[in-house]
């Protein structure tokens, strides 16, 4: 109910969005979790300590598990568009 499917195939989160970084936020009991991490845990598997989730589509509000991959922080940075990756 909190997702719309975009033409790109992204499942775009339509509920709360963090103002500081633009990622979707879900409430799990009394705790908030980023929506993409919740989606990954529900549809793919457990979140592994020390790894981060890379949005392969580069869409911060996407929660499509097919667009998410668990990688090291270094790998995520190198895949990005920032100066470090370049």
Image (cartoon, rainbow, N blue to C red):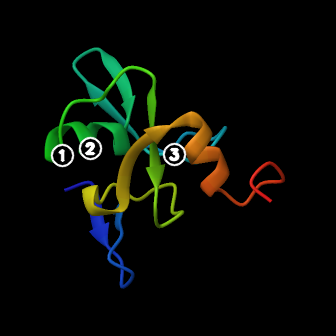
- Mark 1 crowd level (few <14, some 14–19, many ≥20, 10 Å Cα): some
Q: Residue at x 36, y 70 (%)?
A: 10
Q: Which mark is residue 40?
A: 2
Q: Is residue 73 above or below residue 4?
A: above
Residue 7, compared with residue 38, is above or below; it is below
Q: Residue furthest bottom?
A: 7
Instruction: State yes or no: discs 2 and 1 in contact (Cβ < 8 Å).
Output: yes
Q: Nearer the viewer, mark 3 or mark 2?
A: 2
State the CA–CA distance, disc 2 to disc 1: 5 Å
Is residue 13 among the parts visible in the rendering? no
> Quick one: SS at disc 1?
loop
Q: Residue at x 45, y 22 (%)?
A: 50
- The reply, left or right, for residue 37 in relation to residue 77 is left
Q: Which residue is the site of mark 1? A: 44
- At 55% from the left and 39% from the top, the residue drawn is 18
Nearer to us in this view, 22 or 80: 80
Residue 47, quarter of the rendered image: top left
Which quarter of the picture shows residue 73? top right
- Residue on which disc 3 sits: 23
Label 2 secondary element? helix
Report if residue 64 is visible in the image.
yes
Q: Are marks 3 and 2 in contact (CB under 8 Å)?
A: no
What residue do we see at 61% from left, 56% from top? 79
In the image: residue 78, left or right of residue 69? right
Check disc 3: other Cα within 10 Å, few if <14, some if 14-19, many if 20+.
Answer: some
In the figure, residue 65 lies in which quadrant? bottom left
User: Can you give x and y, in whole percent of width and height, for residue 39 in the image?
Assistant: 25, 45
* Mark with earlier residue (3, 2): 3
Q: Position of residue 42 (x, y in %)?
A: 16, 40
């Amino acid at each position: 109910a909190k997702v719309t499917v975009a033409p790109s195939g992204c499942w775009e989160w339509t509920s709360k969005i963090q103002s500081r970084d633009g990622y979707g936020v879900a409430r799990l009991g009394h705790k908030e979790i980023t929506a993409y991490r919740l989606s990954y845990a529900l549809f793919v598997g457990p979140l592994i300590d020390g790894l981060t989730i890379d949005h392969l589509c580069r869409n911060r509000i996407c929660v499509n598990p097919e667009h998410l991959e668990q990688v090291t922080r270094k790998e995520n940075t190198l895949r990005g568009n920032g100066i470090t990756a370049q």
